[in-house]
């Protein structure tokens, strides 16, 4: 085991029951933290709190901070991502009210909670805590690029916010149900909140991203499988850098391409069309061979959320006929997903 693998990843310090804060979000793609916690840690979600301008809901009971605290909530979780990772001024009064109601605040935003004077003062006054999940550990080393034992599966995407985390969680759960020694490795704030540990990879200084990925998925027994949550897209004009560093550092033996068949352009970039799945496969293999010459695609995960069962099955069949890989929506399960799991267990 390398020395780098001994450096701990981030562990969440706030464990309890949550009130999900949706702010004033109007784009569902920016509320993936709230949706992720609802879907994968629903037993810990008491309700949601939205500002009047919000048009997106997680479908949970609408509660005030005081009502949530009375129902056992211990923290308000910022469940949306604002532009640039900042906390808008319009949110601050609600966050202060949460602290005054006896709730901690958990944030995956880039800005530190204690950098806002109003929150720092309210936390001191109320005795509540401010948790920033998107803070990487200190002393992350430069990547070694050396092979390490164990097997790794990375989820990659044609775009951002289309199911890489859900796919990784579903594959991890599915392999575990088959008796595989498997770990889900979180790389984003929502995954870290769900799993209780991980590496906020997009908060790492660029020179150390690959090293952070090595820490996240260290050497393991040959039969162990790490399923690593992907980030961004190699084709995204803003986020390709973190995707590449994660690819090199995680050294995946296998990868699964995630795609939303209804999306026509990159999220938030209407002038940028989506790459084809075939193009993503070719590029991922070409770039992934820098650190793992044996990297290969083992399947495609479609995000068919919101589609009827008939339309979802038609989309899966269409892509399955076109591609030489298993195609499934991991959230719908069924025989198609079982074939994807079969591929994830095949030795190269």
Image (spheres, rainbow, N blue to C red):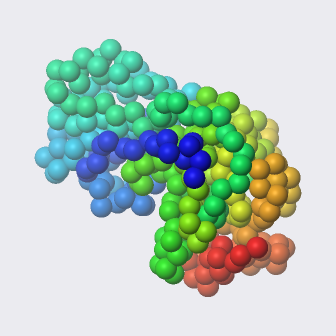
- Rendering coords of residue 298 (x, y %): 73, 70
Q: Which residue is outermost to the bottom?
A: 335
Left or right side of 210 for 82: left
Residue sitting at 20 percent across and 21 percent down?
A: 124
Q: Is residue 267 visible?
A: no
Left/right of residue 118 with respect to residue 203 in the rendered view: left
> Is residue 216 left or right of 264 when viewed as pictured?
left
Please state which of residues 338 and 27 is positioned toward the viewer in this rendering: 338
Quadrant in the rendering for residue 20: top left
> Which of these two is toward me, 157 or 64?
157
Q: In this view, does 307 lie above or below 341?
A: above
- In the rendered image, residue 218, in percent from the top left (x then y), is placed at 57, 53
Q: Is residue 267 above or below residue 207?
A: below
Q: Along the horizontal axis of the image, is 281 left or right of 48? A: right
Q: Residue furthest top?
A: 117
Which quadrant holds residue 74?
Answer: top left
Query: At 16% across and 26% down in the image, what residue appears?
Result: 126
Name the spot of residue 60 as percent of width and height, x first: 33, 55
Please say if 306 is above or below 348.
above
């Amino acid at each position: 085991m390398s020395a780098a693998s001994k450096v701990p990843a981030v562990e969440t310090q706030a464990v309890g029951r949550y009130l999900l804060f949706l702010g004033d979000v109007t784009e569902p793609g920016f509320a993936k933290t709230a949706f992720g916690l609802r879907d994968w840690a629903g037993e810990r979600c008491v309700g949601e709190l939205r500002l009047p301008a919000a048009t997106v809901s997680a479908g949970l009971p609408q509660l005030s901070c005081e009502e949530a605290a009375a129902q056992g909530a211990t923290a308000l979780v910022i469940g949306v991502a604002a532009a640039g990772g900042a906390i808008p001024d319009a949110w601050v009064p609600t966050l202060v009210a949460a602290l005054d109601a006896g709730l901690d605040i958990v944030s995956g935003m880039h800005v530190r909670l204690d950098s806002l004077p109003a929150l720092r003062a309210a936390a001191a006054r109320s005795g509540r805590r401010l948790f920033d999940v998107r803070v990487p550990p200190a002393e992350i080393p430069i990547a070694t690029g050396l092979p390490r034992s164990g097997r790794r599966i990375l989820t990659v995407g044609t775009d951002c916010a289309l199911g890489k985390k859900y796919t990784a969680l579903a594959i991890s759960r599915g392999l575990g149900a088959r008796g595989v020694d498997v770990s889900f490795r979180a790389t984003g704030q929502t995954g870290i909140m769900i799993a209780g540990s991980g590496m906020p990879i997009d908060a790492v200084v660029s020179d150390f991203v690959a090293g952070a990925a090595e820490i996240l998925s260290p050497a393991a027994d040959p039969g162990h499988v790490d399923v690593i949550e992907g980030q961004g897209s190699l084709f995204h004009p803003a986020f390709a850098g973190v995707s590449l560093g994660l690819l090199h550092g995680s050294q995946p033996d296998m990868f699964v391409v995630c795609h939303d068949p209804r999306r026509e352009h990159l999220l938030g970039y209407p002038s940028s069309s989506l790459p084809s799945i075939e193009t993503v496969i070719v590029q991922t293999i070409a770039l992934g061979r820098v650190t793992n010459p044996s990297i290969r695609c083992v399947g495609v995960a479609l995000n068919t959320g919101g589609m009827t069962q008939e339309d979802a099955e038609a989309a899966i069949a269409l892509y399955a006929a076109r591609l030489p890989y298993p195609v499934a929506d991991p959230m719908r399960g069924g025989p198609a997903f079982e074939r994807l799991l079969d591929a994830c267990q095949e030795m190269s």
